[in-house]
Image: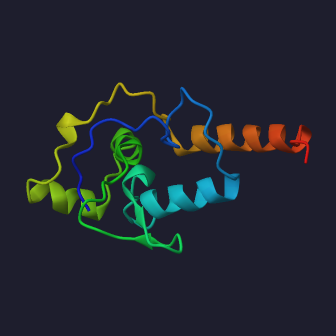
Amino acid sequence: MRFDMTTPCAQCPFRTDITFYLHPQRAQEILDAILVHAHTFTCHKTITHDEEGNPCHSSDEQHCAGALILAERLERPNQMMRIMERLGLYDRMKLRMDAPVFLSAASMLTRMRALHRACRAHPKPS
């Protein structure tokens, strides 16, 4: 996995300027993985899939820039971020910290809960 994306992709779930819906439980799982359990989070645009649609991991994958920005804003870089920085493979100073990314995990969860309520109140016709 590479750590050289500096700005979130157009459909990044961490962006505040788009409507990207994640079930609140899934959003919490992602936030816990990144901020509590120190896991990496691959940008969905860089994941490749096999013929059956299963993810295939490769060295071309990029860590999600939105997740990196959120972790840095919260001053909670995880272990892999620190390791990659020491190896010269990640430079937090190059992140676009002015990118439209949530300021906190709580603000992301609040948005996802509101979208979830709206989806339940106005289901799409079948």
Number of callouts in the render?
0
Residue at 57% from the left image edge and 30% from the top image edge: 18
x then y, percent, for residue 77: 31, 53
Residue 95 in percent (x, y) is at 26, 36
Report x, y in % for residue 34: 43, 59
Of the 4 image quadrants, the one containing the N terminus is: bottom left
Measuring 16% from the left and 44% from the top, which residue is drawn there? 91
Residue sitting nearer the eye, 79 or 101: 101
23 sits to left or right of 94: right
Could you say which is closer to the camera, residue 30 or residue 71?
A: 30
Q: Is residue 52 above or below residue 105?
A: below
Q: Is residue 112 left or right of residue 42?
A: right
Where on the picture, by quarter, is residue 123? top right
Choose top left, top right, bottom left or bottom right for residue 60: bottom left
Q: Image height check: is 40 above or below 116?
A: below
The reply, left or right, for residue 39 in relation to residue 81 is right
Q: What colouring does the structure picture have?
A: rainbow
> Which residue is the extreme one toward the front?
51
Identify which residue, 122 or 98, lies in the foreground.
122
Above or below, 85 against 108 in this view is below
At 68% across and 58% down in the image, what residue appears? 25
Q: Nearer the viewer, residue 37 or 24?
A: 24
Image point (50%, 73%), residue name: 54
x, y (%) of residue 117? Answer: 82, 41
